[in-house]
Image (cartoon, rainbow, N blue to C red):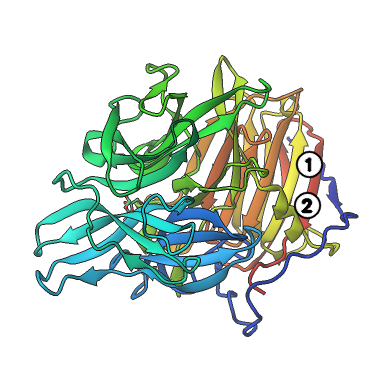
Amino acid sequence: MRWLIISFIVTILFSCVKSPRRHRPIVDSLYYSETHRPQFHFSPPAQWMNDPNGLVYYEGEYHLFYQYNPYGPTWAHMCWGHAVSKDLLHWEHLPVALEEYTDPATGDSTMIFSGTVVVDKNNSSGLCDGKDCLVAIYTSNVHKDSREVVQHQSLAYSNDNGRTWERYSKNPILDIQRKDFRDPKVFWYEPQQRWIMALVIPDLCKVRFYKSTNLLDWTQASEFGGIGDTTRIWECPDLYELPIENKPGKSKWVLSLSGSHPQGPTFVGMQYFVGAFDGTTFTPDDPRQPPRYVDYGKDFYAGIVFNNFPKEDNRTIMFGWVNNWTYGNRLPTAPWRGAMSIPRELSLKEMDGGIRLIQRPIKAIRLLRSYEIIDLSENWNSELEIEMEFDPTNSTEAGIKILKNGKEETLVGYNSKTQEVFIDRTHAGNAGVIKDFDSIERVRAKPVDGKIKFHLFIDQSIVEVFVNDGEQILTEQVFPTHKKSSLSTYSDNGRTAFRVLAWKMRSIWR
Ligand code: FRU
């Protein structure tokens, strides 16, 4: 028997927040309105995008660089695309920041792989015209001939707020003569007044740490690896200190990196370690601990955090690429391919006998809630934020069916026997996307004060589910064949009362 109690409360916000300034003028009604085009997630106007790169705040602007192929909708010709924002929500597209190039003398061609941007505050590099400037450190992926590839680290700098970039004349700045050696993340380590670089030797599942006082000369500090999930190569490391929410005044370091997926090495995902960092070595709290993953959906990869956040704004914000290498090149979207997650605010919490990563959407996302009153049982544009909670003990399974249209639906639910939250995209539509795309992702979560909480963001082809106030996350792409959809709660083998708040979200592009 199936009971269904729906209580939709479409809220009207009474806050007096002002509408954020738009940075992109209305071009035409077709702008960013293609089928599957996310409306409040960042995506490039056209062509291929993968990892976020060089996330940095500088002089009132958040910079988002990203792996970009300006020439086509699949991975190739890696450059750094570029966009800026004043609120982390609305973005202004800028020209390509760092372009692929060919050395006229040798004919070697170099793609710009993932990396970092730092604010060189005291002109430690000597490359700034004034007292500070932006410095990018990226992996130069050099094709020496059609077969031989070398990866080393190079530097470029900008004295005009990232609008134009000059490559350092003595590149590379770090070369260990290896084919795979990449994805430098550089940050300023205040206690020892020096720069730290974390990067990977992907095939050995190792993170190397280097140190420098001038961003140009680097010496190895330590090496970490061989633990956690090593079933797939490691990529895109990041190291940052986070407060422990339920231990006031206490913090720990987190080393996050991309590699294997909780469902095994056929797919890619992100894992993290919690521990201590003393300026030289990262020491995990428990080296034997089973792997912990950042996101249990199939579509969150290469996440990194911002550098140089204003001191008074003590947040750590991460963007990840909403995609999976296993099928990324074949997504049914055009003329663009690839999107970024909602910016996530990170912290730590002591729970279940350990310290866990907590991720929440940035608070400012509320500014995108609209004031319209809508009936969610009717077909509506598929751009919604939903907060819901329920007691899961009265049913075997309960949750919400979203993106419903005809036979299509995506399920976000909780199975009280297995104590798992899941997202089921096997009936999402996905119009023949690709083999292995239809799937169900699961993660364990326990009720908190008797309730399971979902905070959902539905954006045409992206669903992000924050469970229990950020304790677990599942990010998934879905490709319904309809642009409009309805939704309803469901409860199997018992009655469930749901408390649901839902908002239609405004587009960041119009
Ligand atoms: C991760 C990655 C990085 C590399 C970049 C190339 O997705 O493979 O390791 O720098 O993408 O585009």
The residue tagged 2 is 502
Type of residue at label 2? Ala
Where in the figure is residue 52, as x and y percent of width and height?
45, 55
Residue in the picture at 55% in, 62% down: 42
Distance of label 1 from label 2 (alpha carbons): 18 Å
Q: How many marks?
A: 2
Disc number placed over residue 299 in the picture, else none: none
Q: Nearer the viewer, residue 16 or 426?
A: 16
Type of residue at label 1? Leu
Disc number placed over residue 4 in the picture, else none: 1
Residue in the picture at 52% in, 35% down: 442
Q: Nearer the viewer, residue 171 or 388?
A: 171
Q: Is residue 135 above or below residue 444?
A: below
Where in the figure is residue 152, as x and y percent of width and height?
22, 51
**Which is more N-terminal, label 2 or label 1?**
1
Where in the figure is residue 91, as x and y percent of width and height?
59, 67
Q: Is residue 323 above or below residue 246?
A: below
Question: Residue placed farthest to the bottom in the image?
Answer: 28
Badge 2 marks a residue whose secondary structure is strand
Q: Is residue 504 visible?
A: no
User: Quick one: label 2, few (<14), some, or many (20+) residues within 10 Å?
Assistant: many
